[in-house]
Amino acid sequence: MNLADAKISVLDRGFIFGEGIYEVMLAVEGNLLHFKNHFERLQDGAKDMQLDIQFSETKLHDLIKEVLSLNNNPFCSVYLQFTKGAAPRDHYYPTRYDPTLFIMTSPINMPPRLNVVKAILLKDIRWQKCNVKSTSLYANTWAKTKAKKSGGEEAIFERNGILTEGATSNLFLVHRNKVLTPKENEHILPGVTRELVLEIMRRKNIDHEETNISIDSLWKADELLLTSTTKGIVAVKDINGKQIGDGETFNLGVEIFQALKTLSFT
């Protein structure tokens, strides 16, 4: 179906309340990458939102594969969204509903090398259910736009002096050959690429820890790396115009980039 022909009810709870969950996945030559990880996170979010997605892992995988075959893009992102569907407008969850499922694919380019970006630091004003991949993303889109207007690409959030994550990414900080990343809690999304990077570090015996990271740690870091499904891993050379490390050397970033590329294409 063409996007112009896709329609939902104006009473869809995703439209009225921003009450929905979503996933963004990668597909290479029609093959979905790390689908099981994405499906498990989708289930966790649905449970929190009391949303019955009514599809098994196999059925949902088959539906996505059907969309991929129709679009026939060799390398693309897959966007999937569930809501509780249309119901009379009421703040209480409906007791009976037909879920809305939306799937689309978009062609993207795989970067040939580690990208380096600029970022800004912002107070984390988001709600305290950031672990749920909800479609209610106003604070994130506001932060990304603020970063763009400042000449950057990403906004990094801090809450009470502790780093949480980027507006659309998880973060890893490298200091003296040790990698730190914020521990999982209600303030960060359990990113699929984040978990892949943790697994890569375990396999490579890279010293790492999931812990609280203070803002001051940024200015002592050798590297700051950001991860997401569509970007893979990128390095940050400065935040608010202040250089991270030497602004040029990202040895771990390059190593992880190559390892993620291997996972995607082998």
Image: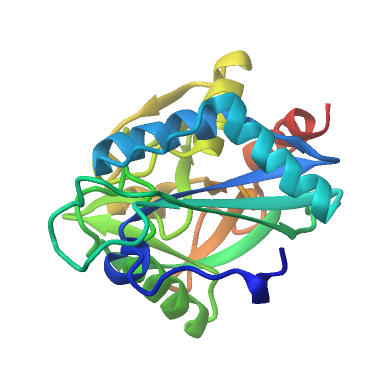
Hey, which quadrant is residue 248 in on the image? bottom right
> In the displayed structure, does residue 105 sit left or right of residue 140?
right
> In the displayed structure, does residue 48 sit left or right of residue 25?
left
The colour scheme used here is rainbow
User: From where the camera sits, is residue 233 visible?
Assistant: yes
Point 29% across, 70% down: residue: 16
Give the total of numbered labels.
0
What is the x, y in percent for residue 148? 52, 79
Residue 73's place in the image compared with 179, above or below, is below
What is the x, y in percent for residue 55? 49, 33
Hey, which quadrant is residue 144 in on the image? bottom left
Point 66% across, 70% down: residue: 3
User: From where the camera sits, is residue 113 visible?
Assistant: no
What is the x, y in percent for residue 11? 33, 70
Point 34% across, 47% down: residue: 217
What is the x, y in percent for residue 52? 35, 37
Q: Nearer the viewer, residue 237 or 114?
A: 114
Q: Quadrant of the C terminus?
A: top right
- Residue positioned most to the bottom: 149
Q: Quadrant of the N terminus?
A: bottom right
Q: Nearer the viewer, residue 154 or 110?
A: 110
Q: Nearer the viewer, residue 121 or 3?
A: 3
